[in-house]
Amino acid sequence: MRIAGRSIGSEQSPYIVAEVSANHGGQLAQALEMIELAAQAGADAIKFQAYEAGTISIASARPEMTIREGLWKGQNLYALYRMTQTPFKWFPELAAKAEAVGVTWFASVFDKTSVDMLMKLDCPAFKIASFELIDLPLIDYVAQTGRPIILSTGMATLEEITEAYSAVDGRTQTCILHCVSGYPTPAAEARLDRLCELKDYYVRVGISDHTVGAEIPVAATALGAVMIEKHFKPQWFRGPDTKFSLAPVQFKAMVGQVRAIWSALQPKTSTVEEPMRAFRRSLWVVDEVEAGEAFSAANVRSIRPGGGLLPKELPAVLGKTAARDIHKGTPLTSDLISLA
């Protein structure tokens, strides 16, 4: 799988996505600044959510439209989306800014209008959010573009994930993101076991994380996640999603930890310990020994450093005799042992 020329898979370090969500605070200038901050923090990509309130819901006072629990308890859906939307008219500037600072951009899509709008801007990939995973006609429409698709799996059963993946129907490359749709998600409910389970079924599996902190994305890296998506915010900003978002310094630290963990998992020959080999144990003469004198536990020992015979040779050496006089502090080598 490739997004804007960057390969994504187990042979590369995880693809790290800074999720803006509502953290632009309704300000284009803040959204543009976040692109630069994401690039400086080491993100491979910055992701927006391409919806306006009228494309994701409708204005209604029905009780079903009110969030009853969690971080946004009491909020009307349409009002919340009006507050958090990323206006479509911003995207040309967002795309230009991302290109200028050298970071890839893409977006989650929620209906055909967002897909069509983004295609005009040559969006390199599309994300299907967890709540839209069951919208198979939307997935079909996105798959027709031929652009890479990222499927987020919060709340989904394995059957629903299979249906969503099947809706792509092999028309483009797909990455599955393990996700828990809790805002924030307690670390104890991060379900990293599900990430491992998904790896049994799909080639590319990553994580979209809503926990507080960076521990879960780092752990997911150790479990083989090929993509890490984490909410990203300006240091000072407070908004609907900031409780489970990382500020630039924290995000940069997470990037470093993810890269380090991935590198540590790669098979390679270690060179850093090579100089230490000289200090491994070997057999040394630890007392003065005359020619013809028998070697014993009193005059030969296994000590550091190397230079002498391997310690495993000690039983065979004991009882044999010295080929010549040997001074204390001499590594015991085979030429010092009499063959007679």
Image (cartoon, rainbow, N blue to C red):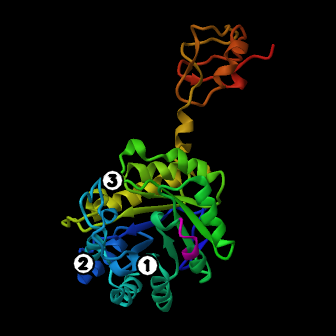
* Residue picked out by circle 1: 105
| Part of the protein shown in magenta | 134-138
Which of the two discs, 1 and 2, labels the residue nearer the N terminus? 2
Does 174 sit left or right of 222 as displayed? Answer: right
- Residue 31 lies, with reference to residue 257, above or below; the image says below
Q: Quadrant of the C terminus?
A: top right
Which of the two discs, 1 and 3, labels the residue nearer the N terminus? 1
Quarter of the figure with residue 134: bottom right
Q: Quadrant of the N terminus?
A: bottom right
Which of the two discs, 2 and 3, labels the residue nearer the N terminus? 2
The residues bearing labels 1 and 3 have C-alpha atoms spaced at a distance of: 24 Å
The picture places residue 80, in percent across and down from the top left corner, at: 27, 70
* Residue under the image location 32 percent in, 84 percent down: 87
Name the residue type under label 1.
Trp
Name the residue type under label 2.
Gly
Q: Is residue 214 magenta?
A: no
The picture places residue 265, in percent across and down from the top left corner, at: 56, 50
The picture places residue 303, in percent across and down from the top left corner, at: 54, 21
Quarter of the figure with residue 149: bottom right
* Residue picked out by circle 2: 26
Q: Is residue 6 visible?
A: no
Q: Is residue 302 visible?
A: yes
* Residue under the image location 45 percent in, 78 percent down: 106
